[in-house]
Amino acid sequence: MSAGTGHAATGGDGWWGTQDVSVRYGQRLALDHVWFRAEPGQVSAVVGGDGAGRTTLLRCLAGALAPSSGEVRRPAAPRIGYLSAGSGTYPDLSVSENLAFRATVYRLPPAQARERAAELLDRAGLTAAAGRLAGHLSGGMRQKLGVIAAMLHRPGLLVLDEPTTGVDPVSRADLWWLIARAAADGAAVVLATSYLDEAERAYDVLVLDAGAELASGTPEQIVAAMPGALRVSDQRPEGDAGRRAWRREGHWRVWDPDGTASCVQPDLQDAVTVATLARELAGTPAGGVRP
Amino acid sequence: MWAMIVKEFRQLRRDRRTLAMMIVLPVVLLVVFGYAASFDVKTIPTVAVGPQAAAVAGALGEPFDVVKTEPAQGRDWAVQQLRDGNAAAAVVTGSGRPEVLIDGSQLFTARAAIAALSAKAAKAAVGGSASGQPATPAAAPKVTVLYNPDLTTADIMIPGLAGVVLVFIGTIITSLGVVRERQTGTMEQLAVMPLKPRDVFLGKIGPYFAVAALDLAVVVGVGVALFGVPFRGSYAVFGLGAILFLFVTLGIGILISSVSENQGQAIQLAMMITLPQVLLSGLIFPLSSIAVGVRWISYLLPLTYFNEISRGVMLRAEPIGPLWQPFVFLALLGLVVFTLASLRFRAYLAPAAPRRRAG
C-alpha cells in the first residue's frame, strides 16, 4: 500500500467479503447464503446472468445495502472505493470537478489529490478531456472516469460494478490495466462482469445464479471441477442431448454428463455454461438449494 | 395506429400519477375554484370605539361584524387592532363625525367595506327622512384607509409573491436536485462515502436555502424600489418568518423527491402542491371568502402563514407578538415536514450504516 492511507487500520488478516449473506427484497431472495472472499492484492470477479445477484452482492460489500442476514466484512467507509452500476459520476460536473469532489469527500490533501488525479487521468487517457463535462463524454470514457474516481483515494477495498460493460476493446484494455494496477498497489478488487473471458483474468471467480453460488474458485479450479465431458459437433444433436448443447465459434458444444474425456479443452465459459445446464436439468428451482 | 393506441393506454395505466393528475386535478380545480375563488367578502370583522360605540355597533349591520365594542378606548387602540389583524375595520366615535378606519392591506375586504359604507350612506340619505328614522351616526362617516390608502394591488401582491417565489424555488428546485442525484446513481455513491447522512442532507439543501433567501431579498428589494411597496415593519421579524417558511418548503421538496422516480414525476407532484398554495393561501382570494369546507386546506399550507406574516410586517408594521399564531403554525409545519424529510432522506442513505462492520 502506498500513500499513507493507513493500511494497518484495516486489521490483521485483512480479507474482505461476505459470510453466509442473504438479501431479501420483499418476497424475492436476491442473495441466498453467499460466502465470498476478496484478498488484498488480488482481483476477484463476480459473474452470472442478468438478475443473478451480482449488483446486490457488490452493494452489500460496498456498504450501500445492509444484508437481511449474514455478515459482511468490509473496511471503514473511507477505505472503500465503489463504482455503482452506471458511472456514478455527476454528468453536469467536468471530469476534474468530479475528481475534486471525491478528493474532498475522502479528505485527500490538495497537493496529493492533484498529483493522484493527474496520474490517473494520464493512465486512463483522459487528460485531454479533464475540462469536459462528464455527461458529454463517450460511454467508455465516462466508465473510465467512474473507475479512476473510485480508486482516487487508494481504497483498501475497490468494488466495481460492471466497469467494462459497454466499453470498446481499447478502453477495456485501459480499464483492466488500471484495475490491475490498483490490485498491485494492494487493494482487494472485486468486480462484477458479464464477460466470462474477462473473469478468466481474475485471480478467483464467484459464479452466481439466481442469487446463489453456482461455482467458485480460481478459473482453473472451476474448469477442473466441471463434471462430465465436452464434445464438438457441427449440428445441434437430436433429442435429449440437444438440451445440453450450445453454439460456440461456429460449432455446437455438447455436454455429456457421464463422459470422461473431453475432445476440446473446456474453458471458464464452458464450465459456467455446464454448471448452469446441470442445475437446470436437475430441476433445482431458481433461488433454491446449491448444487 | 391501433397498436399505438393500445401501447399508449398500457403506458398510461402504469403511470398512475399522470392518470391521477388527468382525472383528479380537473375535479380538484373545479371544487377549489367553485368554493374558494371568490372575491366577495360577506363579513368584515369590525371594532367600535368611543362614546357611541355601542350605538354604532348596533346600527352597522351587514356585512360588518362587530367583534368588539370598547366605549372607553380611542382611535389609537382601534389602529392597533387593525395593525394586529384583529379587525379589518374600526369605527371611531367621539366628538363630531365618526371615522371609519379600514385596513387597506386586506384589499378585497377594504373595497367591500368602502362599498358597503357608501351604499348605507346613500340609503340613509334617501330613505332616512321618508321612514322617519333618525340618521345613524355611521350615515356620513369619514373614511380613512390605513396601510394601503390607494388600495394598490402591487402593495398586496408583492409581499405574497415573495412567498410564491420561495414555494417554487424551495419545492421544485430542491426536489429536482435530490431526484437528479438518485437518477444518476450518485446517491448510492454518497451512501458509501464517508459522509454522515446529516452532512449529505444539510450539504444538499444548504445551497438551495441560500439561493432562495437571496431570491427573496431580490423580490422584496425590487418590490420596494420599483413598485414603491412599503416595508414598514421589522426586517428581523420578516427574516425569521422567511427562514421558517423556507424550512417548510425545502422539506416539502425533499419529501416530493423521496416519492418520485424521476424529474418529470417530481415536477408533476410539485405542481400539484404549489398550485393549491397559490390559489388557497389568501394570496389572491381572501381567506374569509373561501368556503369553510375548503378553507381548512388553507390552514395546512405554509404560504397561508407566510402571507400573513409578510403582509403584516411589510404593510402594517405588525410586531411579532400579535403574529405569534402564524409563527407557531409555521414552526410546527416545519418541524413535521423537516422531520419526515430527513427520515426519508436517511432511508436512502441508511444502508450505509450496516448492522455490523469489520475492520
Image (cartoon, coloured by chain):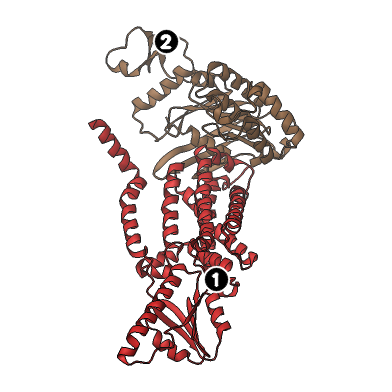
Chain colours: A brown, B red
Q: How many C-alpha atoms fall within 10 Å of the one at disc 2: few (<14), some, or many (≥20)?
A: few
Q: Chain of mark 1?
A: B
- Where is residue A182? Give x, y as percent: 66, 26
Residues indicated by labels 1 and 2 sit on the same polypeptide chain: no
Which residue position holds label 1?
B147
Residue occupying image coordinates x 43% and y 85% = B138
Q: Is residue A237 left or right of residue A108?
A: left
Q: Nearer the viewer, residue B123 or A237?
A: B123
Q: Is residue A160 left or right of residue A267?
A: right
Q: CA distance from mark 1 to mark 2?
A: 88 Å
Label count reads 2
**Amino acid, disc 2:** Glu
Q: Secondary structure at mark 2?
A: loop
- Where is residue A232? Give x, y as percent: 39, 9
Residue occupying image coordinates x 66% and y 41% = A105
**Amino acid, disc 1:** Tyr
Which residue position holds label 2?
A249
Q: Where, quadrant-wise, is the N terminus of chain A in this rendering?
A: top right
Q: Is residue A89 above or below residue B43?
A: above
Q: Residue furthest left?
A: B2
Q: Is residue B51 above or below residue B143?
A: below
